[in-house]
Amino acid sequence: MGRLDGKIAVLTAAGQGIGRATALAFAREGAKVIATDINADLLKKLAEDCPGIETRVLDVTKTEDVKAFAATVEKIDILFNVAGYVHHGTILETDEKAWDFSFDLNVKSMWRMCTQFLPKMKQQKSGAILNMSSVASSIHGAPNRCVYGSTKAAVIGLSRGIAADFVGDNIRCNSICPGTIDTPSLQGRIEGQPDPQKARKDFEARQKTGRFGTPEEVANLAVYLASDEAVYVTGKEYVIDGGWSI
Ligand code: NAD
């Protein structure tokens, strides 16, 4: 018996990294998974690797597209808003365009998804929402992540707000706050540095475990929070950072 048997789960940014690993874990635990991403090629690969997963191209920065997508999903038990982008730099290296883009993709996208799917959950009087935050947020100040950390702190506030407003409707909302997880975007950020070898060493040096986390380790936490095992758990942020923020 799967831990998510009979549940319908929608994920954003499920083409690679933590989103993909979680889509696979949800499917393994018996959920009917609708995996979305902006990148059709990544979704094609996911559908090939796990034919039971339904895939849809979705850009979460497009309000009308989110509305049109939500209209095609009749019932939903689990919504995992994964999409997010890491901007590098201090506040002085964050121009207005970068500030607005980060908040649009990392936070407003969750408003777009939640406002479409919450009414369905409210009607059925059940649902679990997971929002992807980061330990680099209101939990831990990370250098050169000023707007990123600001958006991820906003995700924590958004999640607590939703949890408080809909607890009476049997809808739970929690945020997940990973440390450094070995995903394609992390590799890209390392390769994009002037000295990738030094960048990798610097990233590793801040890991008290001596290694990065894996997308599968975060997926395990997401399965728990999405499942009925966590039925009494809402309005909280769940840190999974190998001790980075101790
Ligand atoms: P990633 O960055 O490797 O992949 C991101 C995915 O998002 C890609 O498949 C991409 O196609 C998709 N995407 C980009 N723009 C999109 C859009 N507008 N609409 C829909 N999809 C879009 O994934 P990751 O590193 O696993 O990160 C996923 C989430 O986890 C992000 O919110 C990130 O901030 C957060 N996070 C990651 C880490 C880490 O170390 N990797 C740590 C903490 C939090």
Image (tube, helix red, strand yellow):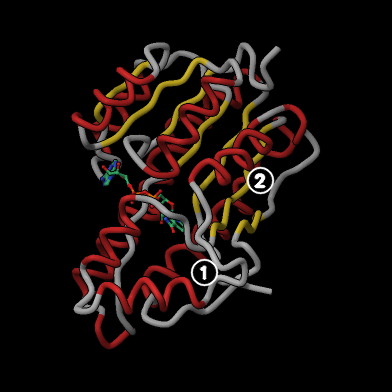
Q: Residues within 10 Å of mark 2 (few under 14, many from 20)?
A: many
Q: Quadrant of residue 13?
A: top left
Q: How many marks?
A: 2
- According to the picture, the residue beneath numbered tag 2 turns out to be 163
Under mark 2, the amino acid is Ala
Q: Which residue is mark 1?
A: 137
Could you say which disc has been placed on residue 28 in the image? none
At 69% across and 74% down in the image, what residue appears? 246
Task: Please identify the quadrant where the N terminus is shown.
Answer: top right
Q: Is 97 positioned to the left or the right of 79 in the image?
A: left
In terms of image quadrants, where is residue 231?
top right
Which residue does the image show at 64% across and 20% down from the upper left? Answer: 4
- In the rendered image, residue 224, in percent from the top left (x then y), is placed at 68, 36
Of residues 164 and 145, the one drawn nearer to the viewer in this rendering: 145
On screen, residue 146 above or below 27: below
**Residue 51, how many percent across, how many down?**
37, 12
Residue 175 drawn above or below residue 209: above
Q: Residue at x 54, y 26 (%)?
A: 26
- Amino acid at circle 1: Ser
Point out residue 124 in the picture as x, y percentages from the top left corner.
63, 18
The percent position of residue 82, horizontal first and vertical second, equals 43, 44
SS for dot 1: loop
Q: Secondary structure at mark 2?
A: helix
Q: Quadrant of residue 34?
A: top left
Whether 194 is drawn above or below 57: the answer is below
| Disc 1/disc 2 C-alpha distance (Å) | 19 Å
User: Disc 1, ligand 1: is the CB inside 8 Å?
Assistant: no
Mark 1 closeness class: few <14, some 14–19, many ≥20 residues within 10 Å: many
Q: Are marks 1 and 2 in contact (CB under 8 Å)?
A: no
Q: Viewer-proximal residue, 222 or 104?
A: 222
Of mark 1 and mark 2, the one earlier in the sequence is 1
Mark 2 CB in 8 Å range of ligand 1?
Answer: no
